[in-house]
Amino acid sequence: MNRAVTTPDGEFFLSDLDPATTPPRIPLPLRAYAVGRTFRALWIYRRHGWSVAHLYLRRLRPGPGSAALAALPAGIALRLACREVFASQLVHRTVLPDGLCLPRSLALATYLSALGLPAQVTVARLRTVAMPKNSFHSWTELYGAVLNDNPDVQLGYTVLQRVAASEAPAAPRARLRP
């Protein structure tokens, strides 16, 4: 009996003939950690805005078991990130159904950072402004590649801010004695 090998929907678009370049599966506890952190980041954004939400992203630590994903080569990590865009956007649409580019980028960067990948939110201003209302934009990058927008978006914008999770562990806080 000949059994066909099946892959999840859309996975064949991201697969090569070489199994060595296939991204690894994400363990369920790590995925749950990433979903929880993404939900929290969007909730903070919804309640307090970007000024507090970006601090949450900066202080975010990778989840347990993320060391293997953090050690992936850039090409495989990018393919893994493309595979995980949908999961982060499900959380985004649950918390902020009408959210535009900034919360969408925050969701993806938080999700990937929780998995251990060095994603960053890029906030930029349009170089030539025709309509001031639409002069700012944001997207998520991983290793310099744009993940959730047109790859050429970088050409028309001047970067104002890049926000990524800190890689260093948090330093213990000094306690003041009364």
Image (spheres, rainbow, N blue to C red):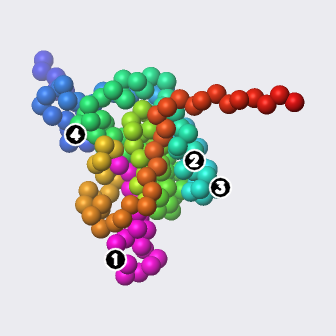
Residue in the picture at 53% in, 38% down:
60
To which residue does mark 4 refer? 14
Residue in the picture at 37% in, 78% down:
129
2 or 3: mark nearer the eye: 2
Q: In this rendering, is residue 30 above or below 157? A: above
Q: Which mark is residue 128?
A: 1
Q: Mark 1 near mark 4, Cβ–Cβ under 8 Å? A: no
Mark 1: amino acid:
Thr
Mark 2: amino acid:
Leu
To which residue does mark 3 refer? 47
- Of mark 3 and mark 1, the one earlier in the sequence is 3
Mark 3: amino acid:
Arg
**Residue at the extreme top of the image, as rendered:** 1
Q: Mark 4 near mark 2, Cβ–Cβ under 8 Å? A: no
Q: Residues within 10 Å of mark 3 (few under 14, many from 20)?
A: few
Instruction: Give the magenta part as a residue range.
Output: 124-141
**Residue at the extreme bottom of the image, as rendered:** 130
